[in-house]
Amino acid sequence: MLSVTDYLTRSGTLVLKHNYLALSPGSATAYVNIDLILSSIKSTDTQIGEWVNIIGYITAPEFSQHHATSNRNFKASNGVNVQALVLWSAGAVNLGDYERILEERKEVERRLLPTRTRLEE
């Protein structure tokens, strides 16, 4: 789940980010092409600050990011390119709870990593 930070209408791309401090480096960023679903999304889904859920697939970057306004796909230098198949609003998000859950998941993964390493040996 990420928040809309920009909508590049010429390329049909939503720029989604979550500036979560525990992620390194920087923030999680997704460059989401919505050309295939334009007829099914609401205008509110593309508003800056809207939290959205997306189902889609990762695409290979094809162009440099400075061409984003004129090309459909572009290279995500600090993120991932996604072709959206479905997009819907996340509704009211309690950001504190969401980030707490992310921290808990990170802790569980940290605890499991040594177990996985021992099992693989």
Image (tube, grey):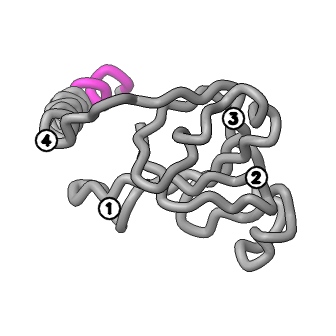
Image coordinates for residue 95, horizontal then vertical, percent? 20, 41
- What's the amino acid at mark 4? Gly
Residue located beneath label 2 in the image: 12
- Quarter placement of the C terminus: top left
Q: Tell which residue pokes out farthest to the top in this image.
A: 119
Dot in front, 2 or 3: 2
Image coordinates for residue 79, horizontal then vertical, percent? 55, 58
Which mark is first along the chain, 4 or 1? 1
- Secondary structure at badge 2 equals loop
The one nearer the camera, 63 or 5, is 5
Which mark is first along the chain, 4 or 3? 3
Q: Is residue 64 magenta?
A: no
- Secondary structure at badge 1 equals loop
Residue located beneath label 1 in the image: 24
In 3D space, how far apart are the residues under numbered discs 1 and 2 (Cα atoms)?
28 Å
Residue located beneath label 4 in the image: 96
Which mark is first along the chain, 3 or 2? 2
Which mark is first along the chain, 1 or 3? 1
- Secondary structure at badge 3 equals strand
In 3D space, how far apart are the residues under numbered discs 1 and 4 (Cα atoms)?
19 Å
Q: Quadrant of residue 23?
A: bottom left
Dot in front, 2 or 4: 2
- What's the amino acid at mark 3? Ala
From this viewpoint, is residue 114 visible? no
Q: What range of the chain is rendered magenta?
A: 115-120
Pointers 3 and 1 in contact (CB under 8 A)? no
Dot in front, 3 or 1: 3
Left or right: 17 in relation to 26: right
Crowd band around label 2 with a 10 angstrom C-alpha radius: few (<14), some (14–19), many (20+) = many
